[in-house]
Image (cartoon, coloured by chain):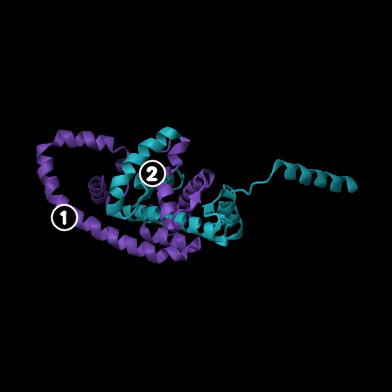
Amino acid sequence: MKMSQNTSDKDDQSPSNKKNISLPISRVRLIMKSSPDVSSINQDALFLTTKATELFVQHLAVSSFNNGSGKETNSLSYSDLANTAEETETFHFLTDILPKKILARDYLKSLEQMQEEEADY
Amino acid sequence: MAERPEDLNLPNAVITRIIKEALPDGVNVSKEARRAISQAASVFVLYATSCANNFAMKAKRKTLNAGDVLAAMEEMEFERFLEPLKEALEVYKKGQKGKKEVSEQKRKDKEKKSDLESDKTREEEEEEEERMEEEPDAENEVEEEEVEN
């Protein structure tokens, strides 16, 4: 994990400003190609997907910050993101990878409740 | 192909910079939040690709094009991205054209000099270009690819 960060950080800095995208196109292509149905992608489509991903990152961060609890403390936390994924229609597809966190204590309690309900039958 | 799972991550430094630029100054973004946004971005790419690919398949095309990506954005209800995307694409295309004219001449000069050298660099540019060859206008794109890097 660390290694890949280091190598990719370096080569992303310089070409970004010229092209008005910051994310590495080659990495985005790799992700796109990991989808089995995709045979080839033209340069414009690749550029657009990269740009769209940047817009998406901005949009997700800003929405989560604005809806979140961190406005007073000037912070953005994981739970702000998880809430946004759950509450905002367009971000619903993220609920799987942004699950809401729940304390083990609460989970056990709800498990107990469920068992009690079953026992009632 | 991605050989290691982390190949499917986007570089954290770049993601962090994009987040910082989008939020008001001085907002503290937790490490966990940054990682989550980065993962969300990868999922977004996959989702967009799959939507765009559906449009290409419907039209019986093998190659994803700009129209497919824009249609995917609409389907995903990210219409708000359409205008900025179209604008960015215009700028990008203009840039490519300009570069191409300049590089055309350079390339011709270079080709004469160093066939051997360019072979080496081409190998380093990986199989990416090989994949491009499936496309009708592969030659142009290979050129553009070289100019960018």
Q: Determine whether the residue tagged by mark 1 lies in a helix, strand or loop.
A: helix
Query: From this viewpoint, which residue is outermost toward the right?
Result: A120
Q: Determine whether the residue tagged by mark 2 lies in a helix, strand or loop.
A: helix
Q: Residue at x 37, y 49 (%)?
A: A23
Chain of the residue where label 2 is placed in the rendered structure: A
Left or right: residue A83 versus residue B37 is right
**Among the chains, which one is purple?**
B
Label 1: few (<14), some or many (≥20) within 10 Å? few
Number of marks present in the image shown: 2
Q: Which residue is drawn at 47% across and 59% down?
A: A59
Left or right: residue A29 versus residue A106 is left
Residue B48 image offset from top left, x and y in percent: 46, 54
Q: Can residue A23 be seen in this view?
A: yes
Image-quadrant location for residue B93: bottom left
**Among the chains, which one is cyan?**
A
> What kind of residue is marked 2?
Arg
Left or right: residue B136 versus residue B117 is right
**Which residue has dot 1 on it?**
B101
Residue B64 image offset from top left, x and y in percent: 38, 54
> What kind of residue is marked 1?
Glu
Residue B4 image offset from top left, x and y in percent: 45, 34
State which quarter of the image contains the N terminus of chain B.
top left
